[in-house]
Image (spheres, rainbow, N blue to C red):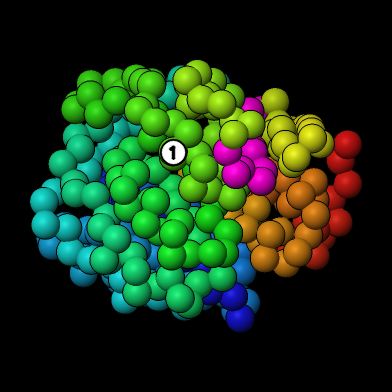
């Protein structure tokens, strides 16, 4: 049985979809990745999150995760400050969104992560707040963890902009961030920002993934470039968490030793499944993984 470590912030999401007037309020952030990993792997993996949640939300949050029998909640810590509140408003085509956040949470410390490092088969670091961990913590993780570290850029290159729309920003020492990952995922704009002041050829990155929404995904492995078309959707319901679900599909391919191109296809398909439904995957969500693994597109 695999053991998958996940590091990232938990938040409270307030989602405003284009065809709905009411606000959908629920746990968000790392929850999308945890639940996607849970339903994809089922009894073939234990998911071990390292995250924090404010005291007033903690019991409800733990009960939610415990509905997924393969999620270990031992490293869900109490947030000493406040849990972040994130408002996401989508345009009518779900292609763009405005994100406003009230960011008051603390970063996850190395001492909180260290207990899982000797046991997990792969480590995922997803940037939800953007300051989920510090560069110092990441460097220490890399020094003490020799297996694959998979990262999702996402909010690493966003301003805090408390309760105002978050904007892209350049970060200090981008090469120092990049070199600590084996595989790094981000959308096209996120990569443009991250690589603006970086020399990617000097880093140790083994695989680079560029997600492009309805235009598919590009994967770069050494000197090979793979382009995977998106799966056409008649009606998009909710794209929140599609990137996290894509990550979960990639992790499935990696741990099952599938080649990079096939892993990209599987991940792309899971993101498609997520866009067709609102919210995160429930424990009862069913799909045919064997059928998905046989997908043959470009």
Answer whether residue 113 is visible to the viewer in this image: yes
Picture coordinates of residue 246 (x, y %)?
Answer: 60, 47
Q: Is residue 230 left or right of residue 23?
A: right
Which residue is nearer to you in this view: 28 or 226?
226
Tell me where the magenta segment starts and ends, as one range. Answer: 203-214
Query: Would residue 6 appear left or right of 226 to someone viewing this image?
Result: left
Quarter of the picture containing the C terminus is top right
Q: Secondary structure beneath disc 1?
A: helix
- Residue located 20% across and 37% down the image: 103
Determine whether, in the image, residue 215 is placed left or right of residue 165.
right
Residue occupying the point 25% across, 58% down: 109
Along the line of sight, the residue nearer the viewer: 136 or 169: 136
Give the class, few, some or many, for how many residues have Cα within 10 Å of label 1's Cα (few <14, many ≥20): some
- List x then y, in percent, for residue 51: 31, 59
Q: Relative to 173, does residue 42 appear above or below in the rendering?
A: below
Residue 12 vertical position relative to residue 253 in the rendered view, above or below: above
Q: Is residue 205 magenta?
A: yes
x and y percent of residue 271 in the render? Answer: 62, 44
Q: Check residue 295 for magenta coloring.
A: no
* Residue 132 visible at all: no
Check disc 1 and report the residue beneath it: 176
Percent x, y for residue 267?
67, 48
Q: Is residue 242 above or below residue 174?
A: below
Q: Quadrant of the N terminus?
A: bottom right
């Amino acid at each position: 049985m695999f053991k998958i470590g996940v590091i990232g912030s938990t938040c409270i999401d307030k989602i405003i979809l284009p065809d709905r007037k009411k606000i959908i309020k629920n746990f968000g952030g790392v929850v999308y990745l945890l639940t996607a990993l849970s339903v994809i792997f089922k009894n073939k993996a234990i998911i071990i999150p390292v995250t924090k949640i404010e005291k007033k939300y903690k019991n409800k949050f733990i009960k939610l995760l415990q509905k997924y029998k393969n999620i270990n909640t031992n490293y869900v810590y109490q947030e000493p400050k406040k849990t972040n509140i994130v408002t996401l408003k989508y345009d009518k085509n779900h292609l763009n969104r405005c994100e406003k956040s009230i960011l008051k949470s603390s970063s996850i410390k190395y001492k909180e992560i260290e207990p899982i490092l000797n046991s997990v088969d792969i480590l995922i670091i997803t940037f939800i707040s953007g300051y989920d961990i510090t560069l110092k913590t990441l460097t220490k993780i890399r020094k003490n963890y020799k297996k694959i570290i998979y990262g999702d850029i996402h909010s690493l290159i966003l301003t805090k902009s408390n309760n105002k729309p978050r904007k892209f920003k350049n970060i200090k020492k981008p090469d120092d961030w990049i070199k600590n990952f084996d595989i790094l995922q981000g959308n096209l704009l996120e990569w443009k920002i991250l690589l603006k002041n970086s020399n990617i050829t000097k880093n140790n990155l083994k695989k680079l993934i560029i997600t492009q929404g309805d235009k598919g995904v590009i994967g770069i492995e050494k000197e090979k470039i793979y382009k995977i078309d998106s799966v056409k959707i008649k009606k998009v319901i909710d794209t929140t968490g599609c990137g996290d679900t894509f990550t979960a599909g990639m992790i499935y391919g990696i741990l099952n030793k599938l080649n990079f191109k096939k892993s990209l296809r599987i991940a792309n398909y899971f993101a498609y499944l997520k866009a067709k439904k609102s919210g995160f995957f429930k424990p009862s969500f069913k799909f045919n993984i064997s059928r998905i693994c046989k997908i043959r597109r470009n």
